[in-house]
Each structure stands twice: as C-alpha cells, then as structure tokens.
C-alpha cells in the first residue's frame, strides 16, 4: 500500500500543479523535446547495479512547466546504510541543434547531450542545472546518476526524487545492489585523446598562457574521463623529456601521477589510467626516459608509443619501421602502436608493431565488403580497435548505417555498443582520437559538426562559470560519455562471468544484444535483460543467489492460494529483469523530433553451452536453483532471443 500511495502521489501532485507530467525512462535511450509519455509511462525508477557500479535513469517532465527543480538526498537500505553525497548527481540534459544528420540513422533537430550538474562531482560546487522551464507540449529530462560505493552492503535501497516548481511530484527510486563488485580500474583498456591545448581553447585561453591553471584544468578533464572508465592517454599537456633525454618530471608527477597511482580524488576509488603515451615522438632518448621513469613509478603497464596514426595519411609507410627501431632501442618494453590492419602492414613491409589497432569496420565488415567475415584471427592475441567516421560515412547525411558510433544524433544503444563488441571479438582495448575536437571549430554548445557527423571527436563541453555557474571551471560530461561508461561496466559483467567459467554463456548473451560489428542498435529493455541475466549467472556461480520472490497472498475467496506454476509463467513485471525504468514500453529511441530550443537556463545548450542457467528476480538478481523455479530459469535468455528475432524481422 505504501508504494501504491507513492505512485498515486506522483500522478496527483503533477496533475494538481499543472498539466505537466513527470515520468521516468531508461538511460539507454535519449529523450528529445518531442518525446511523449505512454499511457502507462512509469513513475518509479527501478535500477540494479553491482557494487562500485554506476546506474542512471532519465526523469522527464512533459510540459508546460516553469521553474522546475529536483532534489535527491540519497538512498537508504533501511538498515543504516546510505548512498548519498557525490555518489548521487542530478544533471540537466541540455540540448544542441543538429543541422545535418549523421549518417543514415541520424536526424536533424534538437538533441540532448551536455549534462549540466546540480552539484558537480569534481569540485562539489553548486551549478545552474535548476530551475528550468519546459515549453508546452515538449519534454525536458534530468539524468539521475547513482554510484554504488564499493563497501555498500547488497540489498534494496530506496529514495525519492522531489520535483518542485511549476510541477510537483515525488518519484520513488528502488535500487537493487548485487552482491559482487566491479573494479575501479577498467579491465578493458582505453586510450582516448585530449590534445594539448583543447581545454585551454574551450575555456577562453587560446594560448594556454597560464600554465598552472591550465594543468589543473586538464587534470579535471582527466578525472572526469576516469570516473567514466575512460583513460586519457595524454594526461599532461607537454613533454617532460627533451630530445636529448634530459627530463623534468615534477609537474607531470604532480598533475598526472595521481591518476596513474590510483590516488586521485575520483569517485571510483583507486582508479588508475590504463594507458599513457610517450609524448614528443619516438626518438631513442625520449622513449628511454619515459620507460625508465614509468618503471621507477610502477606505471609501465600503461605506457605505449604511438608510432603512426592511419598510415599513409599522417605518415608515410616508409617512416614506420625506422620509428619502431628507434623506439625499441630506447626501451623494448614500451609497446609500439600503429592504427592499421595486419594485412596493410604486411603489404608495406612493416615489422615490429607491438599493438595493432584496426578500425571496427575492419574486424568484421558487412557482407560483400573487403573485410566481410570475422577477421579477428588475423591479429595478435593482444589487439585494440577503434571507431572512426567510417561508422557514419565521413560525409554529411551519408547513408551508412549499423555501426557503433559516438555521434550525438544516434540511438543511445549505439553509443554503448562498442564495449560489448570488444568482449565478443576478444579485443583488449579501445582507442579514440580526441575528446575536445569541437573546441577547435567554434562554440561546442552550439555545434559539434565534424568529419561528416555530429560530436565526432568530442565527448565534453567547456564548463565555464559563465555557462554553468559556480566558481571553478570544469569539463561538462556528455550523455555519450555516460553511455561509454555504461558499456565499460557492461564489459565488466561479461568478463566476470567469463572468469567464473561462464565465458560461452557470456558471449551468447553479448551476441544476443549486439550480434556483429554492423548490428549496433539494440533496445534499453534488451540491454537491461542481458545485464540481469549476467548478474544472475555471476551470483549463482558465487553461491549468492537472491531468494525467490515471495508467493502471492491467498485469494480473497478463502481458496488454497497455491502459487502459479513456476514452470509456465514468468515472474511478474515488477519483479523482472532489473530494467532501468519501471515496466512498460519505452518511447521510441529518438524520443520525438521536437525542434524548439532548450527552454532551460541557456538558449540552445545550446550460441549457448549446457551450463547452469540462472534466472533473475526482483531487480535483476538471481533466483535460487531449486526445482520449483527450474522451469523458468532459461526465460531471460529466451527473451533475448525473441527480442532479437523481432528486430531481425523488422529490419527485413
């Protein structure tokens, strides 16, 4: 009765204040201004996460409503354990206008992307996320982002988001914390670029004239990325080693060292960068200096030498072998990296590459293409990959479709797909060329058009105090960066299942969501079901199955009240797969095409084996393996297969 009262309160309060409606949606979709709630739109957020994992959802207001604010004090398990402070962050989702669609699946109009925090998690300063205004017949969303502390006991945590202003509501949150932990330092390595003067440009100092301020600002960018499980491989903006080998590591160690040591003030306690690149070329004394210092500090596993990017575009093929020889003379333990295929390297006589990094399209191309079929066996055991503008054709409004992409105007699941595929194709790392590209092209809050797409090479917005308030300038994260983070965490579930001897099942689950490199669109429901299935397998393997759901109450007519046949009925919808939002069909992935500018503070902001399967109940946890439940143990994976078949048929 208490939950029913809360739900009723949410509806009645919203209705009494205005015609506005408050509802929730899963994080794995994007809420555009034209999004409208379904008749049964959920008003309770039901989440599930491992310890040390982030989980989020959209809290949506469909207008008209003015001066809207939101607050969440935290979540509690009722036994004295809470999740609060900077573990809970509310972000207003600012809009950006897309003038030309990205590839064959993008769309013009207003899209949510920049995440303006209420209180930022880096400096702890109040920003101007609230209040905001929602025009009539439009929707605006707030991302509610929760990080489960590593030491949080497993169990059910509850909280309430208070919505005030032109619309008022109390929106319940229920978070099931699974009894296992994901690591702070990502298993899947990453090396994302941050050009030396990108933050300077975005924050108004085109010449990077204030070195101390710029180094501190850059460190905030590195921290923001690392708290999203992304490693910036250039954590410092100049070289500490000169061409003759002389070095001064003081500033590097001060500003970048904590991120390599795991001592930085990250929300992910102890998180370490998984990559760092030699700065200023492959000269033997330079590489020797980097290798020596990183060995002394215990950072060697992160270091690599970026020999050449996409030859012959940025260097001649004839340049590569001499660079590799020079680098290996400096320190043969420093990996040499080239973004190319083994086929092209062999054709051009390249030898000594330690780390091949092909583009995703070259690991498995579409049928009939040069790279058709799985090409993974042509590469060494340790291989990274990357996505490029090839994912959308590298030209405005091309007809290229299907690939994972970090573009703004794409389905949210395509922003999250790369890490699932990294597991399926057995790739050990992901490279991405830049995270502030739009800083060089104008105002990133107005446009991020680059290389034929929107947002290519840009995952941040410059959080100047003039734009977002507060006293300290910070990077503003994007929805796409959060999707990458979620994908990195999904990878951890897949990898943990593999380490527990469930690798075949994990691969089958991953392929049920994203079958191939060029089938990168899923649904929020499908991802949530897959995560719940993985959690159930992990909990079962650890001997930590969640108890089965309680039997229903006896019927009012005084009958026997026997439980329904567990072998013929799935669990009830409110105890299902731990989806990010309550039961109910979510709106379409693009959430509508509304084109009005942001009405907030700113104008437009601008194959399975015969191993034990365990189903999940409640919020994605596992049920016991007793015979009473055995009939529906395989239902989550069957659901994945059924959803996949529906998608395949729809695509024909």
Image: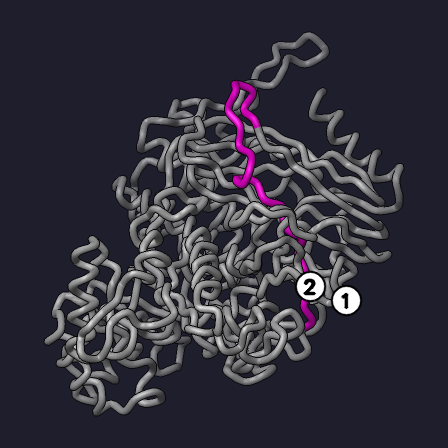
Question: Mark 2 or 1 closer to N-term?
Answer: 2
Question: For this rendering, which residue is in front, 124 or 209?
Answer: 209
Q: Is residue 386 left or right of residue 403?
A: left
Look at mark 1 in the image and give the residue it sits on.
Answer: 597
Instruction: Label 1, secondary structure: give it.
Output: loop
Can residue 44 be spotted in the picture? yes
> x, y percentage for residue 71?
69, 39
> With respect to residue 73, does 388 lie above or below?
below
Q: Main secondary structure of the magenta part?
A: strand
What residue appears at the point 34 percent right and 46 percent down from the top-left corner? Answer: 263
Question: For this rendering, which residue is in front, 579 or 312?
Answer: 312
Please tell me the numbered disc located at residue 30.
none
> x, y percentage for residue 270?
35, 44
Can residue 608 be spotted in the picture? no
Look at mark 2 in the image and give the residue it sits on.
Answer: 95
Specify the farthest residue to the top: 558
Q: Which residues are magenta?
A: 76-97
């Amino acid at each position: 009765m208490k939950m029913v009262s809360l739900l009723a309160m949410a509806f009645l309060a919203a209705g009494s204040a205005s015609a506005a409606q408050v509802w929730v949606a899963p994080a794995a979709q994007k809420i555009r201004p034209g999004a409208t709630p379904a008749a049964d739109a959920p008003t309770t957020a039901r989440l599930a996460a491992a310890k040390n994992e982030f989980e989020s959802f959209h809290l949506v207001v469909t207008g008209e409503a003015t001066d809207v604010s939101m607050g969440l004090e935290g979540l509690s398990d009722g036994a004295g354990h809470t999740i609060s402070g900077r573990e809970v962050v509310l972000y207003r989702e600012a809009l950006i206008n897309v003038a030309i669609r990205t590839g064959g699946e993008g769309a013009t109009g207003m899209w949510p992307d920049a995440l303006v925090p209420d209180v930022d998690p880096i400096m702890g300063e109040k920003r101007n996320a609230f209040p905001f205004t929602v025009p009539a017949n439009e929707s605006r969303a707030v991302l509610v982002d929760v990080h489960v502390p590593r030491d949080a006991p497993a169990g059910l945590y509850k909280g309430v988001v208070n919505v005030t202003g032109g619309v008022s509501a109390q929106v319940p949150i229920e978070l099931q914390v699974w009894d296992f932990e994901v690591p702070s330092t990502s298993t899947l390595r990453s090396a994302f670029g941050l050009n030396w003067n990108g933050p300077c440009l975005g924050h108004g100092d085109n010449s990077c004239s204030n070195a101390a301020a710029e180094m501190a600002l850059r460190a905030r960018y590195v921290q923001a990325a690392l708290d999203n499980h992304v490693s910036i491989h250039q954590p410092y903006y100049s070289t500490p080693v000169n061409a003759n080998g002389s070095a001064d590591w003081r500033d590097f160690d001060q500003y970048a060292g904590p991120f390599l040591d795991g001592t930085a003030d990250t929300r992910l306690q102890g998180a370490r960068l998984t990559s760092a690149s030699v700065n200023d070329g492959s000269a033997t004394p330079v590489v020797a200096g980097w290798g020596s210092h990183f060995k002394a500090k215990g950072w060697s596993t992160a270091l690599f030498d970026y020999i050449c990017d996409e030859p012959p575009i940025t260097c001649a093929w004839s340049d590569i072998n001499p660079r590799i020889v020079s680098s290996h003379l400096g320190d043969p333990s420093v990996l040499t990296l080239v973004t190319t295929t083994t086929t092209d390297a062999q054709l051009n006589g390249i030898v000594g590459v330690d780390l091949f990094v092909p583009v995703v399209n070259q690991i498995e191309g579409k049928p009939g293409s040069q790279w058709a079929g799985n090409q993974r066996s042509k590469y060494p055991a340790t291989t990274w990959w990357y996505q490029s503008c090839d994912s959308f054709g590298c030209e405005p409004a091309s007809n290229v479709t299907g690939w994972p992409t970090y573009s703004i105007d794409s389905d949210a699941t395509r922003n999250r797909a790369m890490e699932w595929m990294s597991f399926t194709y057995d790739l050990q790392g992901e490279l991405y060329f830049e995270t502030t590209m739009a800083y060089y092209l104008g105002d990133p809050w107005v446009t991020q058009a680059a290389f034929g797409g929107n947002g290519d090479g840009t995952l941040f917005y410059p959080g100047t105090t003039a734009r977002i308030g507060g006293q300290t300038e910070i990077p503003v994260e994007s929805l796409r960066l959060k999707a990458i983070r979620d994908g990195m965490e999904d990878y951890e579930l897949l990898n943990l299942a593999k380490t527990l001897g469930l690798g075949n099942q994990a691969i089958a689950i991953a392929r049920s969501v994203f079958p191939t490199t060029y089938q990168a669109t899923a649904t929020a429901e499908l991802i949530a079901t897959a995560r719940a299935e993985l959690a159930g397998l992990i909990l079962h393997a650890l001997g930590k199955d969640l108890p089965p759901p309680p039997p229903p109450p006896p019927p009012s007519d005084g009958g026997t009240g026997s439980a329904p046949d567990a072998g013929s009925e799935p669990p009830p919808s409110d105890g299902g797969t731990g989806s990010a939002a309550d039961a109910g069909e979510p709106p379409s992935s693009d959430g509508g095409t509304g084109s009005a500018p942001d009405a907030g503070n700113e104008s437009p902001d601008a194959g399975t084996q015969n191993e034990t399967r365990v189903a999940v109940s409640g919020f994605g946890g596992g049920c016991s393996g007793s015979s009473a439940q055995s009939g529906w143990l395989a239902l989550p994976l069957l659901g994945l297969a059924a959803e996949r078949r529906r998608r395949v048929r729809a695509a024909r």
